[in-house]
Image: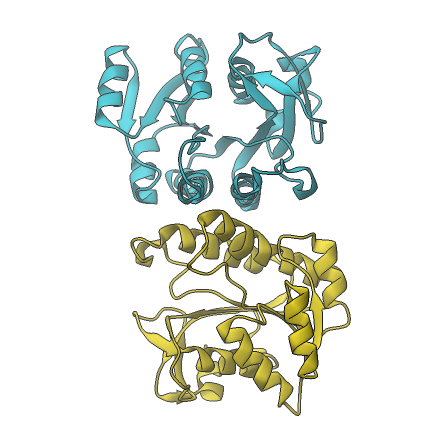
Chain colours: A cyan, B yellow
Amino acid sequence: MKVFVIGATGQIGKHLISLLQNSEKHTVRAMVRKEVQAEEMKQQGLDVVVASLEGTVEDITTAAKGCDAIVFTAGSGGNTGYDKTLLIDLDGAVKAVEAAERAGINRFIIVSALQAHNRANWNEGMIPYYVAKHYADRMVEHSKLAYTIIRPGGLLNEPGTGKVQASENLEKGSIPREDVAKTIYASLDAHHTFHKSFDLISGQKLIHDALNHV
Amino acid sequence: MKVFVIGATGQIGKHLISLLQNSEKHTVRAMVRKEVQAEEMKQQGLDVVVASLEGTVEDITTAAKGCDAIVFTAGSGGNTGYDKTLLIDLDGAVKAVEAAERAGINRFIIVSALQAHNRANWNEGMIPYYVAKHYADRMVEHSKLAYTIIRPGGLLNEPGTGKVQASENLEKGSIPREDVAKTIYASLDAHHTFHKSFDLISGQKLIHDALNHV
């Protein structure tokens, strides 16, 4: 599969790009917002396109054309306002869905947040963020794509262990970003994860095994 | 019909409450956020309940129980942050949808914004607001309710003329809030508006006639 990564300069995105670059099964095309980011990545031998989630669906469609899967792991981040939460985490995600549909790309993976489907469990103080993630996920579920919604717990920067717990509903927990990237990678062609949404935290099972039981 | 009005203290809401209070066909129950607002309205002889769009769906369901229609004309307003846009205009609207479904209330009318269905026509500078309205509307359309989505143009405080233009796509225009309220009122039992979404601005047709052609 040629995998189109939206959010390639993010922390999960970087791990994922690295996995895809070293893959024997898959290849990668990265979408970045700025020309200067594209130049840097091209020098590392990457296939890169410049497009913005605040641009049109047409732009993203053109950028993704020819790929076989889209991974959405972009986020407006904690240092911007809730205007960007609406524009990137919600509308940007749905633009990616629409671009996938228009480009004829059936496989779609999005990184969400633990319990985003469950209002009662949203972290006090981050509720507006969960609202954006929640409706992005619901729009993904309403699409015709072969989607997987991965909802990781608290994101850590420590090295991955390769062992996770994945289930429709999990208690609070955390997970290294590297393991989230590995889970995305392993999900790409894991048919059992198609049309599925699940919480993800560190655990005892190898990722491949965990994905067989979501 | 007993009509449950969410956003009863807003400017459109006040016009609508007045129309419903003077109606021979319909009665009204107003939902307000604060006890003090409820007291004032009770003194005017209104059926009022206190509930918050930031509360649970259960709260809103209980508040609406026994009514035959829900009108959502609440909005976070221009003086709050985009956190409230996410909480009220988006999640609040969808909570109202879910409350309608749980309470067995089939008729649902929501006030949206002109061209909210059409990203290309969103007002520069208000795009995050349109994102919230857009996805609230899409969730309404995905519901099983007999919905009507009314998307008025620029809202004016001048007296209504009773004459409007209503269509799936209209050029920019404006409309008195009183005429939006009258259009909501006229839509309540206008079966031709069920499962319909339309733009609304001032025009040449009587509201009843305009609604027959949406």
Q: Which quadrant of the figure contains the C terminus of chain B?
A: bottom left
- Give coordinates of residue A128: x percent, y percent: 53, 43
Is residue B59 rendered to the left or right of residue B23? right
Is residue B187 rendered to the left or right of residue B44? left
Residue B2 location, quadrant: bottom right
Is residue A155 rendered to the left or right of residue A72? right
In this view, B168 is above or below A20: below
- Give coordinates of residue B64: x percent, y percent: 72, 67
Can you see residue B3? no
Task: Write the residue at 36% across / 22% down.
Answer: A9
Residue in front for this viewpoint, A70 or A80? A80
- Give coordinates of residue B92: x percent, y percent: 59, 56
Residue B57 location, quadrant: bottom right
Can you see residue B200? yes
In this view, B120 is above or below A151: below
- Give coordinates of residue B119: x percent, y percent: 36, 54
Task: Write the residue at 44% across / 84% down.
Answer: B210
Residue A134 location, quadrant: top right
Residue in front for this viewpoint, A115 or A145? A115
